[in-house]
């Protein structure tokens, strides 16, 4: 049953499964769209799509399919029967049509609308105007009566097309190569347990309980121990330079994943612009003056902090190597590279996650900075796999 | 299930038509309804409203970061049993005595169909939703200690809310009917607000709404004020007898709307501009 819509959705990158498709079929079978096209749209969406970030893709696919772009789908009579509930209310239709057109093209719409209305009235009964240009019915080419689809059947409802026309879910859309969930799962590996001293004893200690109970001659005594806690402490340094803009979403997900993992003992986040110098910024905006000394970090966060630097290492060689390379703040008499070296010396484990990492490729002059930094730090591509590798390095004993 | 009638919102709860449709579809298909949306869009209140509209009993399972799936099914109070056994308390030989059903278990056991609200599922551990797949699918679970299967007498209507704090696992998402509650536009908002107040000065409402939506539009605001905060604010303005004319200019009692110092500073600055 209009199976190709299923495949269209999948092609558009919406991960619809057979289960969800069957759910939709079941819903249609039960007549849950009540013969309304709008309800049909929402029904499809609520059963097939399960995250708001996919709404936009869905809207596009839906309008492509159901506006009758020349597809050659078999539309089984059952579906039309479900949708075929009485006469189409043309006043409603015209209004909705107007609304939809308005969204698409606000300039010529009034004139077009008038034309369409006249046209619509005459052609509508013939049953092949409303949806699409192909001369087919609402469901494509097959030439059946679009009266089968009642639009705006329930008063006050937006029709599917007018809702779609708004494309209001566009901002939710994120073509995530990586989902935050994957990052989070990766971060779960970043733990090291120990029984800490300052928490309440809430976990039953079986061995001790057996011991104490025996010592008391079988008179039960329960012994509790402190729950194990993750002792991993993280220091995050994010590059917020201009070349990082394309990766903002990616970095944001990484950032979110760290903060939502909430199993770390401590997470500290600072920002830098292009390269790490004497100061690091407290906010991603990297505003002049809103910073702390890198040495403050050294003093306050001990060497056991695991450091994750996120940046594309795309600074010009002089920005990295010249002692006046920092044009936005103080250099402190050292080049960026030297500051980086100090960081590397201070902390036991430092990784650099690079969204543009070129790997072993060397010798290209514009990559000199990346090359130098990747010699200094353990550098990994910012991807799920890269993160996993980085974390296994961070967790390795030596 | 259709004998329960169709959900059309209540006098206190204004639901968009597509939300009502989602509720009805979920009830009809007997699938959990997953509701996402910004804080304050009335996700949790939805369950209340369905309870009110249908008269079904409402069970709320509040999820916290430490909640485990097992907590919702049943808990075997071994410690109590151990201690009881020391003193030969009555009933100690009956394990069932120490099995305490969780919210899900309670919902399954109910003779009447109930609404089960699993509130803020994203607060729990990442794997939490996956641990409930079988139970929500089959509407049953097995108690190992008593070799007993608890099966839903009447399938409960399951409403799950999420603030989108964490991504939910795909396998779980596939089993749900999904609805995202949009932030209400001015028209809907006026309707919602009016459902909460008996007499609200229209002028006051308009001024307050102007300010409210202006604040939400500000880019630098970290925590946007939500519906419930607007309602609180309106109530505060009303109680304080504040002249509507003052609202836009002075933004009195702003602390009700904005909870972060940084946001307050942003507003102060913008107002100076």
Image (spheres, helix red, strand yellow):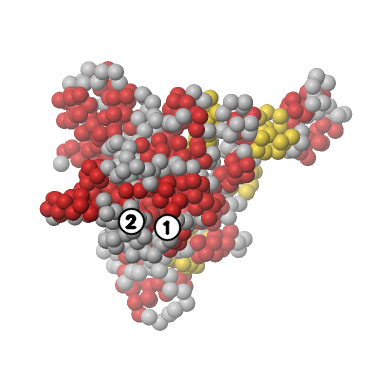
The residue to which callout 2 is attached is A137
Confirm whether residue B109 shows in the render. yes
Residue B117 seen in render: no
* Mark 1 or mark 2, earlier in chain: 1
Number of labels in the image equals 2
Image coords of residue A211 (percent x, y): 82, 36
- Pointer 1 indicates a residue of which chain? A
Location of residue B128 in the rendering, given as x and y in whole percent from the top left corner: 57, 44
Kind of element beneath mark 1: loop
User: Relative to residue A40, is residue A29 drawn left or right?
Assistant: right
Measuring 15% from the left and 41% from the top, which residue is drawn there? B273
Give how far apart the Cα atoms at labels 1 and 2 are.
Answer: 10 Å
Q: Are marks 1 and 2 in contact (CB under 8 Å)?
A: yes
Q: Are marks 1 and 2 on the same chain?
A: yes
Residue A353 rendering spot, x and y as whole percentages = 45, 63
Residue at the outermost bottom position: A363
Q: Residues within 10 Å of mark 2 (few under 14, many from 20)?
A: many
Outermost front residue: A126
Q: Residue furthest right?
A: A217
Q: Which mark is residue A396?
A: none
Mark 1 burial class by Cα count in 10 Å: few <14, some 14-19, many 20+? some
């Amino acid at each position: 049953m209009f199976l190709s819509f299923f495949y269209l959705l999948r092609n558009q990158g919406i991960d619809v499964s057979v289960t969800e498709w069957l759910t939709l079929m079941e819903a249609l079978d039960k007549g849950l769209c009540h013969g309304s096209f709008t309800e049909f749209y929402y029904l499809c969406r609520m059963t097939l799509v399960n995250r708001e970030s996919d709404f936009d893709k869905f809207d596009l696919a839906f309008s492509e399919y159901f506006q009758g772009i020349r597809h050659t789908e078999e539309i089984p009579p059952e579906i039309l029967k479900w949708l075929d509930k009485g006469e189409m209310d043309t006043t409603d239709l015209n209004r909705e049509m107007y609304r939809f057109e308005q969204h698409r093209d606000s300039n010529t719409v009034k004139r077009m609308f008038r034309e369409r209305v006249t046209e619509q009235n005459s052609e509508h009964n013939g049953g092949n105007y409303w949806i699409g240009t192909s001369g087919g019915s609402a469901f494509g080419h097959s030439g059946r009566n679009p009266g089968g689809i009642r639009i705006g059947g329930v008063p006050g409802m937006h029709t599917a097309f007018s809702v779609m026309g708004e494309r209001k879910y566009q901002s939710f859309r994120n073509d995530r190569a990586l989902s935050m969930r994957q990052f989070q799962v990766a971060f779960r590996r970043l733990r090291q347990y120990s029984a800490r001293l300052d928490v309440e004893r809430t976990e039953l200690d079986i061995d001790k309980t057996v011991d104490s109970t025996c010592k008391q001659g079988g008179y039960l005594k329960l012994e509790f121990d402190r729950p194990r806690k993750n002792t991993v402490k993280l220091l995050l340094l994010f590059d917020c330079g201009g070349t990082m803009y394309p990766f903002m979403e990616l970095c944001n997900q990484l950032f979110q994943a760290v903060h939502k993992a909430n199993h770390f003992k401590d997470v500290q986040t600072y920002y830098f612009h292009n390269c790490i110098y004497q100061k690091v910024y407290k906010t991603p905006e990297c505003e002049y003056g809103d910073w702390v000394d890198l040495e403050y970090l050294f003093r306050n966060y001990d060497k056991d902090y695991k450091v994750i630097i996120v940046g594309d290492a795309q600074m010009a060689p002089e920005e990295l190597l010249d002692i006046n390379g920092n044009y936005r703040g103080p250099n402190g008499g050292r080049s960026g590279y030297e500051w980086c070296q100090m960081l590397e010396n201070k902390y036991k484990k430092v990784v650099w996650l690079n969204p543009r990492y070129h790997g072993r490729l060397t010798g290209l002059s514009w990559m000199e900075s990346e090359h130098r930094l990747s010699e200094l730090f353990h550098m990994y591509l910012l991807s799920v796999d890269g993160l996993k590798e980085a974390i296994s390095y961070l967790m390795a004993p030596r | 299930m259709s004998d329960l009638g169709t959900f059309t919102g209540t006098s206190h709860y204004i639901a968009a038509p597509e939300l009502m449709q989602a509720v009805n579809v979920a009830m009809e298909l007997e699938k959990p309804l997953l509701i996402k949306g910004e804080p304050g869009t009335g996700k949790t209140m939805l369950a209340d409203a369905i309870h009110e509209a249908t008269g079904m009993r409402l069970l709320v399972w509040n999820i916290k970061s430490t909640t485990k799936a097992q907590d919702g099914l049943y808990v075997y109070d071994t410690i109590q049993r151990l201690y009881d056994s020391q003193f030969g308390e009555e009933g100690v030989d009956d394990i069932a005595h120490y099995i305490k059903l969780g919210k899900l278990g309670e919902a399954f056991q109910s003779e009447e169909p109930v609404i089960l609200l699993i509130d803020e599922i994203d607060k729990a551990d990442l794997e939490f939703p996956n641990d409930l797949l079988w139970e929500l699918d089959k509407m049953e679970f097995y108690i190992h200690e008593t070799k007993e299967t608890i099966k839903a007498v009447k399938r409960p209507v399951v409403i799950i809310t999420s603030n989108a704090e964490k991504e939910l696992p795909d396998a779980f998402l596939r089993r749900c009917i999904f609805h995202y509650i949009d932030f209400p536009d001015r028209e809907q908002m006026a309707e919602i607000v009016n459902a909460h107040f008996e007499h609200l000065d229209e002028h006051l409402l308009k001024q307050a709404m102007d300010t409210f939506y202006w604040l939400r539009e500000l880019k630098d605001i970290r925590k946007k004020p939500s519906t419930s905060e607007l309602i609180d604010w309106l109530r505060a303005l009303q109680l304080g007898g504040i002249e509507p004319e003052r609202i836009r200019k002075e933004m009195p009692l702003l602390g009700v709307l904005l909870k972060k110092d940084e946001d307050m500073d942003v507003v102060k600055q913008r107002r100076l501009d």
